[in-house]
Image (cartoon, rainbow, N blue to C red):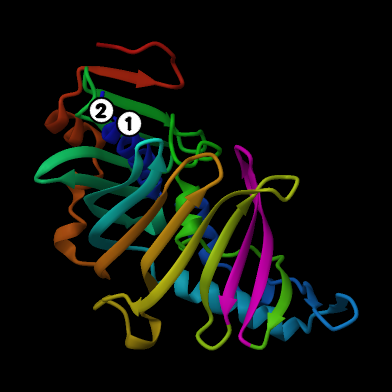
Amino acid sequence: MSRVYQLISPIFRVVFMFVFLCAAAACATAQKPGEVTPALIHEKNSSADAKVAAPALDVLAIVAQQNHRVAGLKIFATRGSAELRWHDENGDHFEQAQVDLAWRNGGDDISLRADKMGERLAWAGANAKQWWLFEPKREPSRLWLGARDTPVPDSLLPFAGPDALLELLAALPWPTAVAIMQDSPDNFTAEFVRSPRGKWVKTRVEVLKNIGFPSHIWLLDAKGNVLAESELSEPVMANMNHLPMADRPMVASKITLKSVSNIGIWQIFWDEPGAREDRLKDRLFDLEVIRGVMRPAEVIDLEKGQPKR
């Protein structure tokens, strides 16, 4: 197996984590602003960090703003490119692939396809209960199956399942309890607990105050160590013709992904993010239909163990 494939395959196991959202996301999106609990704002000053009670209205507005944006992402589809840059004993390297990402039902159903020069590298997806990953370039070709909240083997995010990458894309709603730190007049940082998914138990988000858009996201373990992070830039309004202009969400058109457990940096560039119907067809989310197309030589179900040929 080539060095390039060994590096490309794991990222698409994750980028598949675009498989990225969960049933809980749809429920959390529907929460009412009044349910938000006051948090703490940590205001930095010249002498020491002072902790003061955050006005309930401030925290309410912050959480409501984020969840209003995410509510517009119940269906989403985009196309673009993913680039990997890494360094090893042979010098600097660069690889690129074309990717198609789509989800619906608030992320319960997800599809991610990766191609290079017209050749399929991977096809991943998920529903509310499980994720799947087809690797047609492996010898023999393989289909992986796993429970929604279990890790994807050899992925960029080995500590969590599909929802981890959605978090890094700022595509999951925030919970009710949020702690706010005022970093500067231009931005603030929000921190909140997530239901444990592997080692990931907490999220930290830096938000640009002028547009209320997340610009940097960190996934943390129980000790506060950073597991992975994303930088979100060049925000654009998603093309959502089914929504009023005021409800169309902003999404990053450039994403940089980093993980402490893997070499290299991935950059993803989205073209025309929105909700085009031709990118949301039923067959893209149907495991049995995809299996008939991909015809894997073996199947590994992590819930059952040994591969089936």
Type of amino acid under label 2: Ser
Q: Quadrant of residue 17?
A: top left
| Residue 159 drawn above or below residue 259 | above
| Residue 101 drawn above or below residue 126 | below
In the image: residue 249, left or right of residue 295: right
Relative to the observer, which residue lies in front, 272 or 11?
Answer: 11
Residue at 27% of width from left, 33% of height from top? 5
For label 1, the crowd category at 10 Å Cα-Cα, with few meaning under 14, some 14 to 19 and many 20 or more, is: few
| Residue 123 drawn above or below residue 177 | above
Is residue 178 in the magenta section? no
Residue at 28% of width from left, 26% of height from top? 143
* Callout 1 touching callout 2 (CB < 8 Å): yes
In the image: residue 16, left or right of residue 36: left
Is residue 194 in the magenta section? yes
Residue at 90% of width from left, 80% of height from top? 47
The spot of residue 6 in percent (x, y) is: 32, 31
Q: Which residue is mark 1?
A: 6
The spot of residue 234 in percent (x, y) is: 38, 76
Residue 126 in view in this figure: no
The spot of residue 95 in percent (x, y) is: 26, 47
Classify the position of the C terminus by image quarter: top left
Assign a secondary structure to mark 1: helix
Q: Quadrant of residue 58?
A: bottom right
Type of amino acid under label 1: Gln
| Residue 77 drawn above or below residue 49 | above
Which range of residues does the magenta coloring cover?
186-208
Q: CA distance from mark 1 to mark 2?
A: 6 Å
Assign a secondary structure to mark 2: loop
Q: Which residue is mark 2?
A: 2
Residue at 68% of width from left, 45% of height from top? 221
Residue 295 in view in this figure: yes
For label 2, the crowd category at 10 Å Cα-Cα, with few meaning under 14, some 14 to 19 and many 20 or more, is: few
